[in-house]
Structure formats: structure tokens, C-alpha cells
Amino acid sequence: MSNTCVRVRHEFSAGHRILGLTGAGEKCRNIHGHNFTCWWMFEQGSGWPPRVEFGAVKAQLRAMVDELFDHAFVVHEDDDFLDYLIRHDLKRYTLRDRPTTEAIAAAIGQLTEERIPDLDLVYVQLTEGSNNEAIYLAHDRGPKFAYPPGDLMVNAPSVQPAGVLAAEVAR
């Protein structure tokens, strides 16, 4: 078996609002939701048996996202709306950062690294709707793993440090 990577895909829906944006992004302060598509890429390596067994990994990742994010409200820890969610026992996922697509991708990436530490996560790509996406790059990943091909990340002048996000907004 050659040195390869494998990708797992899952879709979920979640709500959020982003306080503090100005200009065109100011509309995101309103409560709204998105359909998200999440891709995880893992380094497979070579040899037998494969390090990533699709069935087991897909089940674990999908269960994690469904439990924590699907039909949840992703909320900043300082947002006053959090009190309402708690008072009414509504599903929520609280972030220390504003709940942007970048921050949600980072949360999913960090949770993946914590829950499946034996696998080599390359990145988590999170698509918000059909136009916007953010990519969480796992630690120790250089240009060899830049994705998607032809994206601005491929020709970046330097490697992003661990946990730094690369975001793309379709125009």
C-alpha cells in the first residue's frame, strides 16, 4: 500500500450568531443557521493493516459531531443569549472564540485530536453552506499537506503554525 491520506465526510446543521462584525458581516449578529459539511483528512501511511479503518472512524466522527453540534446553537461564552439557551435547556456548544466557521472548524479539529489521538489528523475542512469554508490545519503539517490543490494555501510563503486557520470566502 502506498503512502496515502483518507478523507471522511459528514453533514450537520447548526445555528449561531457572530457579534462584533462590521460592514457586510454585521448581518451575522442575527440568530441564523447553516448546513455545514465537514471533511476530515487523516494520513493513512503504508503497510497492512491500514491505520484508518473507514467504518470505525466514520462512526466515531459522525457520533461526535451529531452529539455536540448537529441542531445545536454554537455560542460565544460571553453572549447574553447563552443564558436563554441554558434556561430553556436547549442544545448548545459554547466556544471561547466568536462562533465563526473558522472557530467551529478549530473546535472540531481539536476534539478530533483529543478523541482519536492515535490517528494522524491532517486537517478539518468545514464548509458553511455552499460558498464559505475554513480549514483547521493539524499540528506539524507543512506545504506537503496544503489543501485544496490550487488554493492560496499551496503557494503560501510560510507554513502556518499549529492550530492556525486558513479561511476562504467564495466571491
Image: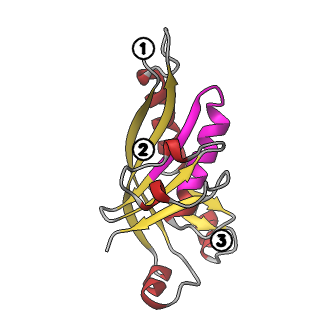
Q: Mark 1 — residue?
A: 1
Q: Mark 3 and 1 residues: CB-CB less than 8 Å, in contact?
A: no
Q: Which numbered disc, 1 or 2, marks the residue closer to the eye?
A: 1
Measure the alpha-carbon separation of dots 3 and 2.
Answer: 32 Å
Q: Mark 3 — residue?
A: 83
Q: Which numbered disc, 3 or 1, marks the residue closer to the eye?
A: 1
- Region of the chain picked out in magenta, as a range: 105-125
Placement of the C terminus among the 4 image quadrants:
bottom left
Any mark on residue 31, and which?
none
| Amino acid type for the residue under numbered disc 2 | Trp
Q: Is residue 16 left or right of residue 128?
A: right
Coordinates of residue 156 in the picture (x, y in percent): 52, 60
Secondary structure of the residue carrying tag 1 is: loop
Q: Is residue 56 left or right of residue 94?
A: left
Viewer-side residue, 83 vs 19: 19
Secondary structure of the residue carrying tag 3 is: helix
Coordinates of residue 20 in the picture (x, y in percent): 59, 84
| Amino acid type for the residue under numbered disc 1 | Met
Above-or-below relation of 11 to 115: below
Placement of the N terminus among the 4 image quadrants:
top left
Measure the alpha-carbon separation of dots 1 and 2.
Answer: 23 Å
Q: Residues within 10 Å of mark 1 (few under 14, many from 20)?
A: few
Look at the image and tell me whether residue 161 can be seen.
yes
